[in-house]
Image (spheres, grey):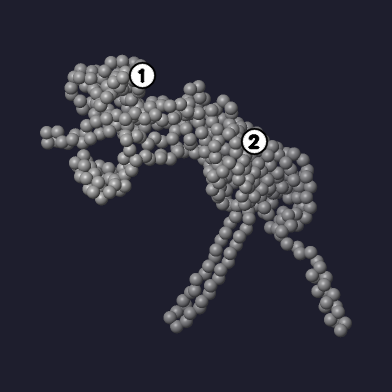
Amino acid sequence: MKNLCILLAGGTILISQPGCTSLERFKSATYMAQDNTLVEVDLFSTQLLQGEIVPTGGSLWDLSAGAQTQFVQILDRRYPENGLFIDALGRQYPESWTLPVQDQIDKKLRMVFTVRKNRDYTHLSDPASRFSPADRIEFIVFSLTLPDSSGLRFTQWNRYATEYGEIEIGDITFSRNLTFEADGRVDPVDINPRFNLGRNEEQMVRSRYLKLNGTLDERSIEIREEGTREVDLTGNVMADVTLRFEGFPERITLPLFETEDSEGSMKSELKALVLKEALVPRMKDAPDTILARLQVEYIYRHVQSGWKTYQEWDDRVEYYSGWLEKDVPLFTRKDYVPDFFCLGREVPEKKIVTVKNLHGGEYPLQFADYNDASRVLDWIRSRDEQDPLEVGQYTLIFGGMPLTAVGDAGRQQLKVMPVY
C-alpha cells in the first residue's frame, strides 16, 4: 500500500509539470535598442511584362462545316506553300476588320526583393556582439512608393512567392498564412517470387512557416512578413502587381495581303490598310529611369544564449528594431516604350511614310509587328508603276509628296525603323 501511494504521488507530480516543448518561443526576451545596420533589403531585379492580347473575331474552327470547306479552299489558293497554309489555318481572323491590339498601358510588373542579414563572424566570440549563427529576422515590413510625377499607379496584386510557398492574390489587400505540405509514401516491395514483404507508410506534414499580409493603393504597395518558430525571413521574395501608365491614343496599321496568280506566277498583293487606335504610355518628358522609394522596417532576433541548440524555447533573446530607406530603379524608358515600327529614313533628317485618306486626314504608317512593316516595304519596292502608290482609300505620302515606285530616289532609301 505504501508503494502504491508513492507511485500515485509520483504520477501526480509528472502530470502536473508543464511540458517542455519547442512551442515556446524563448526562455527570456528583452528589447534592447534600434540598430539600422543589421539588415539589408534591395530590389534585386524587375521585369515589365506586356498585357495579354485579347483577340477579337474567330478562327477557322469556329465556322460551320460547309463554311470551313470553303474557307480551306480559299486559303489553299492564297497560300500554296505548305508552311504558310498551315500557319493560316490556326490564325485568328478579325471581325469587321477590327484589329486586336495588345494593351500598352496596363502592364504586369514582377519584382524580386532580396532580404539579408549583415553577418560579422569576426565578433562571434564577443559577448557584446549583436550577431550569432542562430539570429534571424523575425518581422519585416517593406513598402515601395511611386513618385507623383511618374504618371504610374498600382491597380492590383497578382502573386506573391517566397522559398516557403507562393499564393495567387488577385485583390487590393490580402492576409495569408503560407504553408507547406508533404506526403511521403513507400510502396510494397517484392523481395523474390516466393517471398513478399509489404510496407506502406503514410506521413502528412503540415506546418505554418510564414504569416503574411499586404496592402496596395495607387501610389504604393506594402508587405508585412512574420516568421514563426525557427524561420528566418532572409532570402528572395517575388511580388507580381499590375501597373497602369498614363496613356494617349496612337494609330497603328494592319496590312491585309492577298496572294494572286499573275501570269502563271504567285505574288502577294497589298489589298487594304486598316488603322486602329491604341493607347500607349505617355512618354513626353519621361525620365530615362523610373525610380521608386523603398522603405523597410524590421525586428531582428538576436540569440544571447543557447544558440548551439536547434530548439528556440531555451534561448535567451534580445530584440533590435531597424529602419532603412533608399531610392531603387524600377525600369528604364526602353522597358515600357512599345515596339512599334515605321517606314522611313534617318538621314539627312528623319522622315517617315504616312498615309492620307480621301478626306484629307493624314496619319503615320506604323505597325505593331516588325514582319508587317517589312512585308509592306517589300511590296513598295516591288512596284513598277509611275503613279502614286495607293492602297484602297489611302495614298502613301513621303516627304510631303505622294510616294511613287519609279524614279523616286527616296523610295530606295526606305527601311524599317522603330517609331520611338
Q: Where is residue 417 in the image (x, y as percent from the top left)?
A: 35, 26
Instruction: Please give left or right for residue 253 compared with residue 313 in the image.
Output: left
Residue found 32% across the figure and 27% down from its top: 416
Q: Is residue 244 above or below residue 5?
A: above
Q: Where is residue 159 in the image (x, y as percent from the top left)?
A: 54, 45
Instruction: Please give left or right for residue 179 compared with residue 345 in the image.
Output: right
Kindly indicate the quadrant of the structure image that contains residue 100: top left
- List the residue tagged with mark 2: 295
Measured in 3D between alpha carbons, the distance from the residue under mark 1 to the one under mark 2, in whole angstroms, is: 44 Å
* Secondary structure at numbered mark 1: loop
Quadrant where the N terminus is found in the figure = bottom right
Instruction: Specify the amino acid type for callout 2.
Output: Gln
How packed mark 2 is, by other alpha carbons closer than 10 Å (few <14, some 14-19, many 20 or more), is some
- List the residue tagged with mark 1: 350
Farthest residue to the left: give it: 263
Q: Position of residue 373 (x, y in %)?
A: 31, 30
Q: In this rendered view, identify the residue nearer to me: 62 or 129.
A: 62
Kindly indicate the quadrant of the structure image that contains residue 313: bottom right
* Secondary structure at numbered mark 2: strand
Q: In this rendered view, identify the residue nearer to me: 207 or 328.
A: 207
Instruction: Please give left or right for residue 86 compared with residue 106 in the image.
Output: left
Q: In this rendered view, identify the residue nearer to me: 150 or 28.
A: 150
- Asked if the residues shown at circle 1 and circle 2 are in contact, with their CB atoms under 8 angstroms apart, the answer is no
Q: Is residue 311 above or below residue 384?
A: below
Residue found 35% across the figure and 27% down from its top: 366
On the question of residue 42 being in view, the answer is: no
